[in-house]
Image: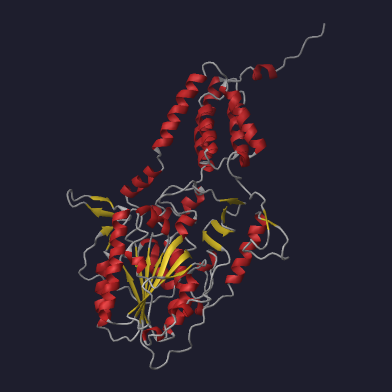
Amino acid sequence: MQQSSAVVLPAVMSSWRGLGLWNFYFITKLVLLWYGQLNFHALENLAFAAFLLFPLPPQWLHRLRHVLAIPLGVALYYYDSWLPPFNRLLANSAQVSQFSADYMLELAGRFINPTWLAVGLILLVGYLFVSQWLRVTSFTVATLVLVLVVGNTQLFVPRQGVVPVLMSTAASSAPVAGDAAPVVIDDAFLNTALDDFYASQGQQVTQFPGALAADAVPVDVLMLNICSLAWDDLEESGMRQHPLWAKMDILFDDFNSAATYSGPAVLRLLRASCGQASNADLYRPGAKQCFLFENLKQLGYTDGLLLNHTGRFDNMLGLLRDGGRLQAEASPFGELRPALTGFDGSPIYRDRDVLTQWWQQRLSSGSPREALFYNSITLHDGNRRLDKVTGKAVSADYKVSLGQVLDDLDSFIEHLQASAKPVLLVIVAEHGAALRGDLMQVKGMREIPSPTVTHIPAGVKLINAKAQLSQRPLHIQAPSSYQALSELIARLVDGEAYRTADFDLLGVTRDLPQLDMVVAENEGSVMVRLHNEHYLRMENQGWMPYPQR
């Protein structure tokens, strides 16, 4: 009689235990995906579920798997989030280490959403209740398989690669062969459009005058660079209609900061005399004619540097000198008292006090022409002020600080006008504060160069000019960036607007450099605006439509 051989498979197959509480883990992800709050990776999640489900007969081995699965599950949740890749956090670890404990606690609190905590509690109770009668694991696995097969496109937006969209070349802002042939906006098209954009921008240079006339009116150029200020922040704070903007003679309606961090934003401004460079090229040697203050030096200007902070964080002073070729020593604060402390505990001084003190010194100096670069971080995230009642340092309210900054700049303009000295004043933000955040990043984070952060105010005022100027700003509606400011300075620096009443300001603003495609970039992420749609590429992966709120 033949004996049957032992079969191991049935014994193993009898050890299926289901996902248990891991069902709740996947359910929360699926709900977040449904509402467009997650960058869900279906294959990786299904593989994680398979790891949890694989039958392991020994009870101790099954429990060990759950312990090992916890860090894996946390890492996968982070990978599925819209948060920047973890290697980006490690790259910024040196800067993060300088944050104060209070600021770190404040940042951590922004990741806690009371609404989603309530939803999570409801889902947990619902799961515990339903699991008494139903094998929830079957539904969970079936849904994961469905998402993998159907794709995220049916639930939210594609994770990688852009949905092919046909449009005519007339509607596209990127060059394509043929006059009417339809094009497909996919990864290849966007990559080519981006390369063409940078190639075209690399050919653009502002032509400054070779020299100024001996009898040219000496005009000071004051460049006020304000950190953490975007049109979206002004709208959120209810200050889009602040009187300061109505006082501008020229106002850019569609100005692109092209960056969301202070370092690259400042470099782009100081290298404004050439077209927009890629983020990587900002940190490579540039041609001398690209540097705005170098061009002004050639015309006899003395450069000046003024900050309302120490400039030590992230080596801002070194960046200005080495990357922006601004060699002037920062003006001292003298007897001024700090109004705030930064997120790293360093002192921050009030804009009005710093600017008016410098102006008094400027009026007594012998330089006929001075070009000043001023940088303010009054609005920077994490700033703190002393509470007048308790004497403790508390988080500086953005809206209060914003009102003070705008009022200080408004007051400084009146101060300049009272001096009767010709001044070409340029106000341009660095980047926004991301007050509202969006689907892909929490408020205050600026890793992704989203339009709410890069669409910034920029204006020019001709102070004490003799030209007959309108009582309302002349609006530049074309997509613009820093080279447009450089071009305006080059056209106004001869002082003719300060000499004659019939100066044609409208003519000066004609044919300013404009962007054929709006591009903003940080290390690891690129955002482009094409045909009024925004597309994002992160870590050199595929492009995806940027989800709007």
Q: Relative to residue 228, is residue 363 depicted above or below? A: below
Residue extending farthest left: 389
> Where on the picture, by quarter, is residue 367?
bottom left
Residue extending farthest right: 1
> Where on the picture, by quarter, is residue 350?
bottom left
Q: Relative to residue 182, is residue 360 depicted above or below? A: below
Q: Quadrant location of the N terminus?
A: top right
Residue 246: image location, x then y, percent: 36, 67
Q: Camera-side residue: 322 or 473?
A: 473
**Whether residue 68 is visible:** no
Q: Relative to residue 507, is residue 143 depicted above or below? A: above
Q: Relative to residue 332, is residue 148 depicted above or below? A: above
Q: Which residue is depicted at the point 38% across and 85% down?
A: 501
In the rendered structure, the answer to whether residue 134 lies left or right of residue 462 reads: right
Residue 472: image location, x then y, percent: 38, 70
In the rendered structure, the answer to whether residue 316 lies left or right of residue 160 reads: left
> Where on the picture, by quarter, is residue 154?
top right
In this figure, what is the number of numbered marks?
A: 0
Residue 206: image location, x then y, percent: 51, 78
Residue 358: image location, x then y, percent: 27, 75
**Whether residue 508 is visible:** yes
Q: Which residue is depicted at the point 53% across and 48% down?
A: 547
Q: Camera-side residue: 105 or 247?
A: 247
